Amino acid sequence: MEIPALSAPTNSVHGPVKSTRKLPSDALNLYSPLHFLRRGGTERFNSYALTQREKRVSVSADHTPNRTQPLSNSDNQSDKGWVHFVGIGGCGLSALAMLALKQGMEVSGSDILWNSFVDGLQEAGARLYLGHSKSNIHRNDRLGLPNAIVVSSAIPPANVEILYKRDYWLGKITEHHDLIAVSGTHGKSTTASMLAYVLSAMGDDLTAIVGAHVPQFQGGNMIAGCGENFVLEADEYDGCFLGLSPYIVVITNMEWEHVDIFQDEEAVINTFRRFLKKIRLGGHLILCGDSEGAYSLLCNTRQGCLSDQALWMQSTQLTRGGYRLSTYGISDFNEWHASSIRPNLQGGSDYVLYHRGCPVEYISLQLPGVHNVLNSLAVIATIKALVSDQKLTKDTLNCLGLHLNNFLGISRRFQMIGKINGCRIYDDYAHHPTEVHAVLQAARQKFPSMALWVIFQPHTFSRLAAFMKDFASAFSDADRVVITQIYAARETNTWNVTGRDLASSIIKPSAEYIPSLEDVVEKLALEIFINPNREVIVLTLGAGDVTTIGPRLLQELQEKSVDTSQPNS
């Protein structure tokens, strides 16, 4: 079948973007000195607080012990300002910190654990502390305080360092850009990374911040460019994305997920509707029409949902909210949809791309799973929105498809850890029933004839209690399931729920409860070692420290293999 071009030939988006708009050097000049009384005393404590918005600065007299000296000594002071990040080792804040360093700011930060993100920041010149303390917000000479203190949403309210949530900081560093905010319950990290990678490969000198490590990004989880476009993974957790003013919003899907923040799905819907009101006049909403939750955002009690024809028309006309709308999905009522999806020899998926019912291009991905087909559709629809005054030519679509195929994915998303004999070990961040089902479907697509063993670590007591029934039916594509003890994260077990409860509720396949990660490694290593040529996929799932199982299991198997190959002395 010959696929026609989407339009007559015109200028392509894959030429270099010639823009040098940068964040103004005075972006940090928003603060004035304030005085606070230390709790329980009369000693005055000088700090800085926002003067142009609600002041959310607080001081606690409590003290979390930390090392008296920073773990890295970088005292390079910058005229562009000093930013301190609390929880700097997280995926999101580490990227913001690296971007601040790239833009010439002085950066310091603290966290309770050391990881690879912190390694990169240390090498780039950040001043880092292990543990939280008020002394962290002073330089070694104790002169001056940070111009801004940015705090992760995961940091509790009683933290001893001055608090300033990251939503306002995100708003400030993106306000002078054309912000593309990629949001949704699932798929944000992969979609934002894929979009940033493709735009960069097509010549756009963009800036990007994502909440995961991207092997194809030189900056790991960020790109520091000088152009107008800024791709941001926009998180709904704690309403963080409500401080943004995006030009384009992408909503990959929407359902109840953060049960510790949102009371029910209606609360999630209301938060996303507030977010849509942040879209700039004349902007664009890119939405997955196949997602029932996301599609509900197009409905209201008076008019109901838009018709299929109305969906197609909204990309050329402004909605009542003052922005354009494009939908994508597998269903053919979407403006952009995928058809004839099939596995390819790269282990990913091929499909035919349709626009408004007409086939326009063949797309081939290295990433498996229908969810990644949807992610790629979001990227295509977004790039079209960025060149709304132009048309996508056949050459441009070919170029876009080439770069989509070259995208290799992100860390902790069906990431291969290693292979030994007949065993392949993978790791994935999935911690919600929808995500578990999606990654198992992808694993089955890639390895249809191999045994699939899943080790799942539930993440937070509240999430397992809320979705117990959904989790129980999410593992049907696996051949064997091991459930570990719950990764508590920020919670205490007031729900009286355990991993054993989940293991006993899974009807198919067989499931067992092994609470200790060490015991899981020991048992699996022994079973695989006894039958080394058995073709098996070991897949670890969860947002906690279950990710350590794969490397430890691989190392254990390698050591056993070496021991057996040694001749007896």
Image (cartoon, rainbow, N blue to C red):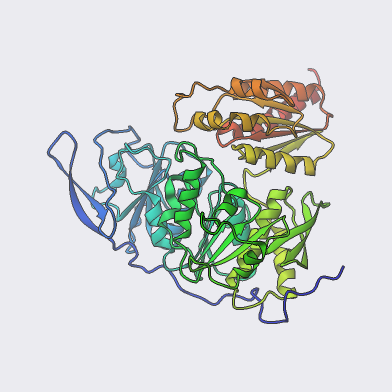
Up-down relation of residue 62 to residue 334 (above or below)? above
Up-down relation of residue 485 to residue 33 (above or below)? above
Q: Residue at x 40, y 59 (%)?
A: 171
- The quarter of the picture where residue 444 lies is top right
Going by the picture, which residue comes out furthest to the top? 569
From the top left corner, tell me how far across and down residue 252 is, in percent.
60, 53
From the top left corner, tell me how far across and down residue 460 is, in percent.
51, 31
Up-down relation of residue 159 to residue 325 (above or below)? above
From the top left corner, tell me how far across and down residue 345 is, in percent.
83, 51
Going by the picture, which residue comes out furthest to the front? 302
- The quarter of the picture where residue 432 lies is top right
From the top left corner, tell me how far across and down residue 17 is, in percent.
57, 75
- Please name whichever residue, 533 or 353, is drawn nearer the observer in this view of the structure: 353
Q: Residue at x 75, y 63 (%)?
A: 353
- Please name whichever residue, 227 or 334, is drawn nearer the observer in this view of the structure: 334
Q: Quadrant of the N terminus?
A: bottom right
Residue 328 as seen in the image, left or right of residue 477: left
Up-down relation of residue 115 to residue 410 (above or below)? above
Q: Is residue 213 visible?
A: no
Q: Is residue 110 visible?
A: yes
Going by the picture, which residue comes out furthest to the left? 42
Please give the count of numbered marks on the rendered protein.
0
Q: Quadrant of the C terminus?
A: top right
